[in-house]
Amino acid sequence: MVHDQFTATRRRVLTTGAAVSAAVVAGCIGGDNGTGDGLLYTQEVSPDGDFDPVVAFDAYSAQINNLVYNGLYEYDFDLELQPKLAAGEPEEERDGERYIVELVDGAEFHNGDPVTAEDVVHSLTAPVEEETQNMPTYQMIDVENTEPVDEGTVQIDLEHPYGAFTEIQLAVAVVNASVRQEDTDAYNTDPVGSGPFTFVDWASDEYVEIERWDDYWGDPQPELESVRFEAAEDDAGRVSQILAGDTDAIATVPPEDWDQLEGEDGIEVYRAESPSYMYVAFNCNDGGTTDPDVRRGIAHAFSLDDFVEQNLGESATALESPIPPIVDELGWEFPTDEWAETSPGYDPELAQELLDGAAPDDWNPTIIVPPDDVRIALGEQIASRLDELGYDAEVQSLDFATLGETYVTGDADDYEMYILGWTGGPDPDVYLYNLFHEDNEGIAQGHFYEGSDDFHDDIMAARESVDQDERRELYIDIVDEIVEEVPVIAAYSEHNTIAAQDYVQGLEPHPSVSYNPRLVSDETTVSLEDG
Amino acid sequence: MGLFRYTIFRLLQAIPVLIGISIITFALANLAPGDPVRLMLQGQEVDEELIRTIEARYGLDQPVHVRYWNYMTGLVQGDLGYSIHRRRPVADLMLERAGPTLLLVLSAYVFALATAIPLGVLAAKRRNKPADHVSRIVALVGVSTPSFWIGIMLIIVFAVQLGVLPSAGLVYPWQPPEAAGHSGYIEHWIESIRHLILPMIALGTLQMATLMRVERTQMIESLQQEYVTLARAYGVPERTILRKHAFRSAQLPIITIVGLNLSTALGGAVLIETVFAINGMGRLFIEAIQQLDYQLVMGITMVLGAIFVIGVVITDISYAYIDPRVTYGDRE
Amino acid sequence: MATTESQLEDQEPGAHAEGDTADEAVETRVGWRYTLAKVRRDATARIGFYIVAIVLFIAAFAAVDSNLSRLTFGAVSDYAAAEALPIFDHPTRMPPPGEGNPNQPPAFLDGGTLSSPLGTDPQGRDYFTRVIYGSQVSVSVGIFSTAIGLIGGTIIGSVAGYYGGRIDDVLMRAVETLYAIPPLVLIIVFIVFISGGSPDIRFAVVGVGLTFIPVFARIIRSRVLSVREMDYIEAARAAGVKDRNIIRRHVIPNSFAPVMVYATLQIGVTILIVAGLSFLGYGAQPPTPDWGEMLRIAHGRYMHSNIWLSIWPGLAILVTIMGFNLFGDGLQDALDPRIKE
């Protein structure tokens, strides 16, 4: 039950963002060009090959899983939760410690088994019972008391109330409990779901193939006969392929090439906001950046808007807070404009003054970044500006594996700044708890920001409350403090982009990476125009 | 010593080198800082007991010499270790990924030999004439240009600007057409060749330039040999001299160099596979390095070294086979 | 003579087979001046010499750095580069917000200006200055790592050649083993494992240098083998001169000429390898303007939107290496007249 990007452990941070690139594989390119009703979809990364949602931990396996399985609830194109296998809204009881969900009638797995409450319970509890990598997402579930009430009704109990529970956990993909339990290992590469497509075949680092399930129980019906996923890590390679007609659609249009592809006859480009959050974090534990004035000075020294416009163009928006706009738009109505005003903007003179006053003698900060050219460029941009102010900053690009070891040490010799990204779910909790709370010090965050007396308590209180108004007030306080004290600079939110041949109809990027390509949904169903 | 015994002798001679390679790869991987188990767990909070269990499972709790011994005995049985990161045996991954690399390297050699030998002979025949100068300039540029840049230039011209050849990936001729999404064998093989052309040229240019230089020098030398002069004096036509007498003996060093340059070619494959997004051992090596997947890195280094050693043995044997003068030399 | 080892020697320029007479070694020592005179007469060698001289001059000039007087590898910022190059007065640091003119085409195209002859990169940095500054990294890495290979190889090769026997066997076996692993692969493994995953150009210098010790060791060894048998060495030994002194005073100087030739050619090879390392991300780290690193970014991000970024650094590598190759070939021809053009 992966919520792909929505899980909260450390590897997630690392495998996120535009250039997941490093650890990644490019695939062999077939040459389908729109003949027949198969879609060839080329993306950046091949899946790890975990087609059991209980185990799957990478967004690219989850993409396949979201076509092969149905969710209990699924996200629409605004990231709002819509029932799929559930019959309607969940009922909340016991102040958010119990949820009751009714299932729809008539839902079936590929092998003909009906989808039952038993399956849903198994999908929710297996990650915890088997301690898979997805465990942290479902940790608050009370495994003992989560049980079927009857064939079509599920009762989910929690250890404690969790404010984001419905938004995050109820989008679980539902596995076939009996088939899975028979041979758990085999299930991983021979999945039985209830989704519109069935799994055909895959080869590690090469391709995945799925085909339409003609007896799909749901509505609307899938139109594509089959879909083949291949990977091309190289941005330039994907662009070449779509230009040459070697593929039907590519995920993630490189920002530099957006204009060219947009102007190309026969190719359409699409874009959707996503809950992605890239940031520059400061080491608040050790070194010069423990002083808030140094952090403010750095924030004033460079222009984020300018950087984003120059390097990401149409593909990203500059951020004012750690909460991406698409999450805010779900109804939170945070005072984003106020935060924008309070956030330190580009002001080299003020930066000089602050740094000269607060920076230690011989201050030579190290900025560590992943091997992603955009974030390297952001590091260089900051270093160049500090250089002009008379401070010699060094940018170090580290492999993801090394970076993961390094950015949580809290040691100023290792880093005074790091630039990372996080793609979370549709709730502020996934950003603020994982990336700011002291529980996650040295795990998901390496800034070790202590904050005011209430800072960490507020994050926890908001996490464990189901009173959304109360949560909103708490989050405003928390973000106010972040904007004021600058333990991190919220940098930008990347969009999900797709370029496709114009004979591909109805393709729209979904805000969640793991829902792409969204081939069958109430809003749009993808098909190939005869040609 | 007969040819058969010489073959056996050369194979036995290769064993110490293979052992040496295993020592080097093992030493480098064990010098490395960082703990593979912790890296595998990616910093998740785990208790020490779990770490020890995993260490015991992969034999990481043993002292170095025991681990090396285990590694060695595994190698002898064809067991290259287990990639903890990918949860698969290294040997399986090698089998999957060796094909594209070998295809690339072999075709690069075919390209290099097919161009270098005629051009080298021509240059030697027309020594100090325009054809010679041109071939020398080509050779000079060839040895001075980074292969990956040639690849980038070829992509820009043929894939980006002209759009006539694909810029990424390979199509494997040994796969069934359906696996590559093709409808028939003809299409499949045409696609295989189209995908191979650019990377083949990029990787083969350096080899071509090196071989051309050698071919030219050797031909000049052998054309100056006494028996050639003698043949000329007897009125043997120049063409026959070239083909029968000079050419054959000049090819021997070429064979040697083809073998010895395997190492450069395999190293070049890492770059070319990166430029052309080919899923071979070179890419796998870079991925393994980025993931700090020690076992996989050791496995790839070992296999690359072994390919080189076997390649040299094969060229040595074919050298001995072709050149009757070789006495299957007992080493001094 | 069909062993790997003897064939390897065939390849090495300037290396002589073991049977070469002692007189020849004497001749090469005496003949340095003669050699240079010959090089001067050879047109291609002269071109090579000029290219090398110009590149070295540019590299040295770019290296004079008003902010950082020390020779720095890793963290030379572009800002420093701009100040170091008064005649090329272009900012190669990322220009401040609102300044700079990103993605300007080269001067000979529409929209190009003479002040940025090769155009600017997408960050607005002058590409000409970056390419020029790149020579510093390439050339200094080439020279330093060749020096490591040369020194290490001289020590190992002369010890092996002079003493012969088991020491020789073991050393040469080790050398042969190192030969078997593709240098690029070996160097990357070395860099990553030694640096603990944070590669840096300094590790690349050492790694490349170590990898080429075997090549030099071989050449030195074969020279030493021929020098060892010479009468005056026998005489010195008989007179009780210490081995160490014999090696230092007689053996090494007598073996030097072919090694220097090889070193010149090797600098070219090294630059090629370091470019490859940087292209894969294991050499120079950004923002250091290094040709391989510039190509990495140009290929990865801008191959469709700005092809010029891929062209210039490659041409720079080509010209530089060609210079070293021409010069080295000329030296070799002059030293070893067996195959005279």
Image (tube, coloured by chain):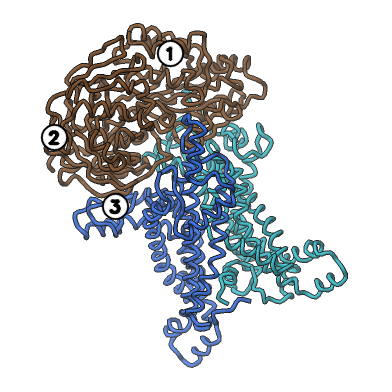
Chain colours: A brown, B blue, C cyan
Bin the neighbour count of mark 1 within 10 Å (Cα to Cα): few under 14, some 14-19, many 20 and up.
many
Could you confirm whether marks 3 and 2 are on the same chain?
Answer: no
Specify the amino acid type for callout 1.
Answer: Ile
Write the residue at 39% across / 32% down: A133
> Quick check: B185 above or below A433?
below
Could you confirm whether marks 2 and 1 are on the same chain?
Answer: yes
Residue nearest the observer in this picture, B249 or B332: B332
Does any portion of residue C189 appear in the rendered image? yes
Tell me residue A10's x, y (percent): 44, 29
Q: State the mark number for residue B164.
A: 3
Q: Farthest residue toward the bottom?
A: B234
Tell me residue A295's x, y (percent): 54, 18
Bin the neighbour count of mark 3 within 10 Å (Cα to Cα): few under 14, some 14-19, many 20 and up.
few
Which residue is tagged 2?
Answer: A216
Distance from the alpha carbon under mark 1 to that under mark 3: 57 Å
Specify the amino acid type for callout 3.
Answer: Val
Question: In which quadrant of the rendered view does residue C101 lie?
Answer: top left
Q: Secondary structure at mark 1?
A: helix
Residue nearest the observer in this picture, A261 or B180: B180
Specify the amino acid type for callout 2.
Answer: Tyr
The subunit carrying tag 1 is A
> Quick check: C289 above or below C1?
above
Bin the neighbour count of mark 2 within 10 Å (Cα to Cα): few under 14, some 14-19, many 20 and up.
some
Residues at circles 2 and 1 in contact by the CB criterion of under 8 Å: no
Q: Secondary structure at mark 3?
A: loop
Which residue is tagged 1?
Answer: A459
